[in-house]
Image (tube, rainbow, N blue to C red):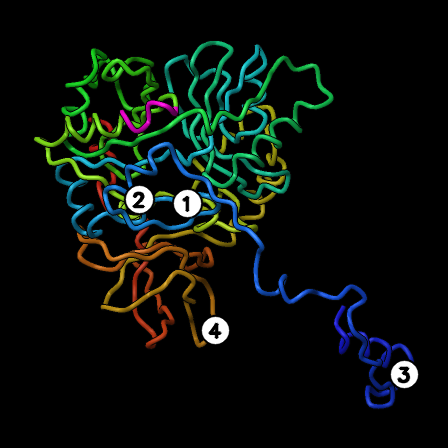
Amino acid sequence: MCSMASIHLCARETDRSIAETGTTTSRPPFQPVSFGALAGRIEEPVKYTPVHHTHVGLGAEQLVMGQWIRPRIYTTTLNEYQAVREHVGLIDVSTLGKLDVKGKDAGALLDKVYTNRFKLLKPGRVRYGVMCDESGIIMDDGTVTRLNDDHFFITTTSGNVEFIHEWLEWWTAGTDMDVSVTNVTSGYAALNIAGPNAREVLSTLTDTDLSTEVFPYMAAPRGRIADIPALMLRIGFVGEMGYEIHVPAEYGTALWNILMEAGKSYGIAPFGVDTQRLLRLEKKHVIIGQDTDALSNPLEADMGWVVHFKKRDFIGKAALQRVKQRGLQNKLVGFKMNEDALVEDGCSIVQDGQSVGRVTSFRYSPTVDSGIGMAWLPQTMGSDRTPLLIHTATGDASASVHNQPFYDPDGVKLKT
C-alpha cells in the first residue's frame, strides 16, 4: 500500500483532513538494494539449438527469445517470404519444448490438461491443443502426437516447457495414474520445411510415401530421411504445405545441410523468426504470450473450436462454462489498415478519445499489400468491417476488422 493511500485511509478513519494527518517519516529500505542489482542481471544464461553454428555461418542476424538464441533474418524479410510462398523455405524450430508422455494413463492425463480430446487420437496422428489453468486462462499451446497406444510426444511454446512439465507432474502427483513425463527438448532438433515445393524436396530423401492419400494433413509417421531416423508431422504454422521434422539432436546440422542441398533446384531458402511471424499473421495463427495475456481465455481469443465442453472434465472447464453463459465480453480479431501508418505492437485502439482495445501483432503483408494485425476489442466491436481508429506515434490511423485469415482462408494449401 503506497504512502498517500495510507494517509488518506488514516485521515478518513480518524475524521481528519489529510493535512492534519500529516505524512510519515521517510526511511531507507530495511534491506538496501545494491547498485549492481539495479544495473541488471549478473549473468544471462542462453541456449543454442543444435543447428546454431550453421546459422552463424550463413550470416543470420540473431535475436534473443527468452533463453534461446534464434536467427531473426538471413537476407531480407521479403526475399524469405517470397521463397516460402512461391518455392520452399526452411526454418529451425528446435526451440520448441518437447515432452515424452508414456504409460497406460497417458491419454487420460492429456484429456485432463488440454481443452480438447486426445485419449481417442489414433497412433500416427497429430492434433493441436490448448492448456488452461483453473480460471480458464490460456497457459500454453502446442501439438500432441500419438506414437502408439501408451506413448505421446507433445510440443510446447519455446519458453514454457519447464513450467508445463511441472504442471503435468502436479496433476499426476498423489494419484495412481500410470504415466511418466520426460522433458526431451535438448534431445531433439526440429526443422520445418514449408512451401509449394516442400513435398518435392523431401521426396528425394525418403522412401516414405508423401502423397496426400497416404500422408494427409495432421498425419505423423516415423521414417527415415537420408537414413536419419525422423518423426515427420504434416502440420503448418506459416500457411503452406509443410513438414515439421524431429530428429535426434546430433543429426540436426546434417539434416539441415541435406535439406538445403536437396532444395537448391527447387528455390529453397532459410527463413528466420521475422518472416515466420509475418507468414503466421497472414493465417491469423495466435502466438501465446504475444496475442494473449494473463486474462485471455480461448473463447474470447477466437479459439473456441479447440474447447470440447462435451468432455466429462478438463482443467478450466467450469470457468469457461461461466464465461460462455455470461456472454463473451472481449474478442481477439484481425484487422486491415485503410491507410499507410506505422503501427506498433501495443498501440491503443480508441473510440471517442478513450482507449477501448490494443494491437497485439502488426506487419505489412505483401499478399494483401497493406498493414495487417491482430487486436483485442470489446465483443460489440468485433464484427467484420467494423471501422477502427488506431492511435500511433504519428497520429490516429483508420483500419477495419477482418475476421477471416488474410491468406488461404479455407486452408487448401495446407491440406493438398
Question: Does label 4 or label 1 sit earlier along the sequence?
Answer: 1
Question: Does label 3 or label 2 sit earlier along the sequence?
Answer: 3
Q: Residue at x 52, y 51 (%)?
A: 293
Give the residue type at disc 3.
Asp
Q: Residue at x 42, y 14 (%)?
A: 147
State yes or no: discs 4 and 1 in contact (Cβ < 8 Å). Answer: no
Residue 251 colored magenta?
yes
Q: Which residue is mark 4?
A: 354
Give the residue type at disc 2.
Arg
Give the residue type at disc 4.
Gln
In the orientation shown, which residue stands out farthest toward the bottom?
Answer: 19
**Residue 280, numbered circle:** 2
**Of 88 and 318, which appears nearest the observer?**
88
> Dividing the picture into quarters, in which one does residue 212 lie?
top left
> Dividing the picture into quarters, in which one does residue 345 lie?
bottom left
Q: Which quarter of the rendered picture does the N terminus lie within?
A: bottom right
Q: Which residue is mark 3?
A: 15
Q: Which residue is mark 1?
A: 287
The x, y position of residue 395, in whole percent, is 34, 77
Question: Does label 4 or label 3 sit earlier along the sequence?
Answer: 3
Instruction: Examine the rendered structure and indicate whether residue 410 appears above or below residue 116.
Output: below
Q: Distance of mark 4 from mark 3, alpha carbons?
A: 36 Å
Looking at the rendered structure, the secondary structure element under dot 4 is strand
Question: Does label 4 or label 2 sit earlier along the sequence?
Answer: 2
Q: Residue at x 17, y 19 (%)?
A: 203
Q: Distance of mark 4 from mark 1, alpha carbons?
A: 27 Å
Q: Which residues are magenta?
A: 249-254
Residue 44 colored magenta?
no
**Residue 416, numbered circle:** none
Horizontal placement of 262 versus 374: left or right? left
**Of 256 and 195, which appears nearest the observer?**
256
